[in-house]
Amino acid sequence: MIHTTATAIHVSHNYTYANEAARTGASGFVAGDVGKIAKQTDTLAWYILTATTPTWQLIGSGTSTVTA
């Protein structure tokens, strides 16, 4: 599991990709990676890896609001 360096708190995803091209172009997945979660930062969408080819299934998306 990935941890933030400052707090050692678990994050909810295993991979972070800037956009669809980066996510779908990723490689090197093995059978043990199936079922892991990716966050796509340009759309704030969440995907689950369903095959090592890779094949991703959208599991959630949304928008972000930052208030100061």
Image (cartoon, rainbow, N blue to C red):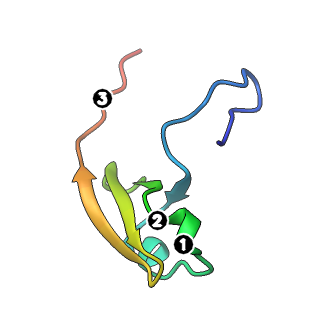
Q: Quadrant of residue 43?
A: bottom left
Quickly name the residue at label 1: 31
Q: Report helix, strand or loop for mark 2.
A: loop
Disc 2 and disc 1 in contact, CB within 8 angstroms: yes
**47 on left or right of 39:** left
- Residue 52: where, in percent of width, then height? 48, 78
**23 on left or right of 62:** right
Q: Report helix, strand or loop for mark 1.
A: helix
**Up/down of 40 relative to 66, above or below:** below
Disc 3 and disc 2 in contact, CB within 8 angstroms: no
- Residue 20: where, in percent of width, then height? 37, 72
Q: Report helix, strand or loop for mark 3.
A: loop
Residue located farthest toward the front when viewing the structure as drawn: 31
Amino acid type, mark 3: Thr
Quickly name the residue at label 2: 34
Answer few, some or many: residues within 10 Å of disc 1's Cα (few below 14, many 20 plus, some between 14 and 19): few
**65 on left or right of 6:** left
Instruction: Give 42 or 52, whichever is nearer the viewer.
Output: 52
- Look at 72% across and 20% down and name the residue there: 7
- Look at 54% across and 72% down and name the residue there: 31
Quickly name the residue at label 3: 65
- Residue 54: where, in percent of width, then height? 44, 79
**Up/down of 45 relative to 62, above or below:** below
**Mark closer to the chain start, 1 or 3:** 1
- Look at 24% across and 47% down and name the residue there: 60
Q: CA distance from mark 2 to mark 1?
A: 6 Å
Amino acid type, mark 1: Ala
**Count of number-bearing discs:** 3
